[in-house]
Amino acid sequence: MDINFSAEDLAFRDEVRDFFTTEFDASIAAELSGAQGTDYKGAIVAWQKKLHAKGWIAPGWPKEYGGTDWSSTQKFIYETERGLAGIPDVVPFGLKMVAPVIYTFGNEEQKARFLPRILESEDWWCQGYSEPGAGSDLAALNTTADYAGDNYIVNGRKIWTTFAQYADWIFCLVRTSKGMRKQQGISFLLIDMNTPGITVKPIVTIDGKHSLNEVLFEDVKVPTDNLIGEQDKGWTYAKALLAHERTGMAEVADSTRMLNSLKQRASVEVNGGNAMIDDPIFQMRLSDIEMELMALEYTELRVFASMAAGGMPGPESSLLKIKGTEISQSIHELQLQLASFYGGALPENLNADELGHDFAFEARGKYMYGRAATIYGGSNEVQRNVIAKAVLGL
Amino acid sequence: MNFDFTEEQTMIKDSVSRFVRDEYDFDTRRTIVESDEGISRKFWSMFAELGWLSVPFAEEYGGFGGTVEDIAAVMEELGKGIVVEPYASTVVVFGGLLAASDNSALKAEVIPSIIDGSCMGSLASTEAQSRYEMSDVATTATASDGGYKINGEKTVVANGGTANKFIVTARHAGDQFDRAGISLFLVDASAPGVEVKSYKMMDGQSAATVTFKDVMVPASQLLNAAGEGMDLIDQVMPQILMGLSAEALGIMSTLNTATVEYTKVRQQFDTPISSFQVLQHRMVDTFMACEQTKSMLYRGLCQAGEDDSAALLKTVHALKATVARYGRLIGEEAIQIHGGIGMTDELNIGHFVKRLMMINVTFGDGDYHQKKFNQLSYSA
């Protein structure tokens, strides 16, 4: 057993590292922080355009549509380096979610119309799946699309729509036929956000920020050209996409970086004059997380190694999302514990320097928003149902 | 990158696996445990013939020339049968220390007898007060007639009753807790002044209190230079801990499989209890616990092949702590989900759990190793 990379792969790693070091500077990181007065959308789009110029914007896509043609090892190295460098992932809705559906199930006209603009970050996409009555039970969705000649007429409500306020397009699951099994009669529809009848209502989350929205559709006319694949077959396409969403969610590199930063802070933060990292109980809490992460790193490597060898990932792949999110949440918890009551202060009319603990705002925000990690992408309870059925045969 | 066992390792793994499946069912094991010696000499000879006893030894002594990966491969399969024959104490611990020592005369004399099955051995290091600190040694070795005279008492020495030879930790310099001044001596169980009182342990294995009263040992029986015994123990300990953890992994996966299968056949409220979501989620948690333990073991096996002993040491401490935590989770869940039948001595479940419990307290429990991990990771 070994985890050695080939000389070519190591050279690739150096190239990725170099690129990230030279191109991703502190000013981009500051703009992406979401702090007051920053321009998240402008900054992430600018960064994505840099990645596109380098040819690295869509490692997961087939070469013919603008992918990188990287080996699975190279993709793994790229993701690891990105996480370790603290660089945010690309906004997934266009590049990682709708694009694979378009190039897999869409027609030639749709590919030519949408894929280049996704690669160039010209269109911002959002995901219209969840509804007030359809969360983990996604197939219970009620938004309707009635066929009317050249158009569908869409009525209903989508919810928890991340960054709908920035979006040019939304991909939706809509009900086109009734009276059959609830997974049937669903269609996959692309909708221009500027169409009359669409209203976006902000939802402020418990971290005090606005990234989620409710999207209302009132007699929205959508050209039938915007239907992906066949009518009533949308569930099949969506399931393929969900499988895509659920891989690569262990985020080991990101958690490793966060944990290192937490240790760094714990050596500066004091109680009674003693560094928190020297406190034996705090050390136990740290190592509870660190040991779990050390194991998860190798679980991820095991999954990756079997895929690189051309096989299917083994049953261990199914735990990546659950363990990955549990670990990232436990890091957030300990970070907020370290921030103590300083972390309760809000940044409205206070800056971090005045507070004396510059990580405290972020610690609170990360903890609060981080609760979502075990809810989205198939809640961890749903994930356990999936493992029980698919792996344990229960 | 590669996480597969080699063809050779797979062959030996399969051979142990076949033995456990075809020859070592639970009733056979029970008969062995209840016998006078508590082990099967017949099976031990078979282990020798199949080459299992030669795994960690160099080819110049007739060994297989294996690595810790080979040891782990064998131990995992032995765990699946909770095999009570003293493979860990003789081959992995006693043999491992001997193989790493620089006393070639001693190695040439003893290793072939381990390989052919005629010598069982054990490390006699633990004392009534020592708990997990290997360097807490009150047993003394005083220079005498060009050799050493050993006095002291070792308690709960694994397989002490059947061992022909002991490797004894004894102090000839320094205070009770000093690392320096401890030597490792090879001592015959039949040497004058050695007294062995054997007893059964809860995992079906046996242990002994071994008393040394003015036992004369020539200097030629020193494993390494006098006073440097702890260095040798530290050198071999990662391999020992990975071997025991591999055995634990075999037990954990067996318990999980047995529990899942049981829920599919056990009917309550007119339905198999496997249909209850509360049980499904708990079995998913034990499945994940087992996979994470396996990953941590593989991390250690990969690092053992690299030249970074600091990283390896952190990993083996984390591994033993993980085995403790998840071993307990899996053991307790197996009993709970089996319900009343899980409480019975008749079913094998409790016996697997008791072996896991003993592995936990062998060479440091979870808290001991987590504290060591913390010292390596967070102390300035």
Image (cartoon, coloured by chain):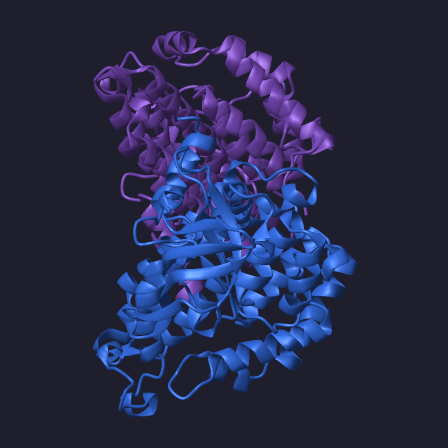
Chain colours: A blue, B purple
Q: Residue furthest front?
A: A149
Judge whether A312 appears above or below A224 on screen. Answer: above
- Residue name at image x 43 percent, y 7 percent: B28
Image quadrant where residue A10 sits: bottom right
Q: Is residue A245 visible?
A: yes
Say if B63 sits above or below B312 in the image: above
Query: In the displayed structure, does residue B328 sit left or right of residue B294?
Result: left
Q: Residue A19's x, y, as percent?
A: 68, 75
Q: In terms of image quadrants, where is residue A210? A: bottom left
Q: Position of residue A249 (x, y in %)?
A: 49, 54
Residue A387: image location, x then y, percent: 43, 36
A308 to the left or right of B293: right
Observer able to see residue B178: no
Q: Is residue A130 left or right of residue B77?
A: left
What is the x, y in percent for residue A364?
A: 30, 73
Q: Quadrant of the C terminus of chain B?
A: bottom left
Residue at 30%, 67% (x, y): give it.
A368
Which sits in the foreground, B114 or B5?
Answer: B5
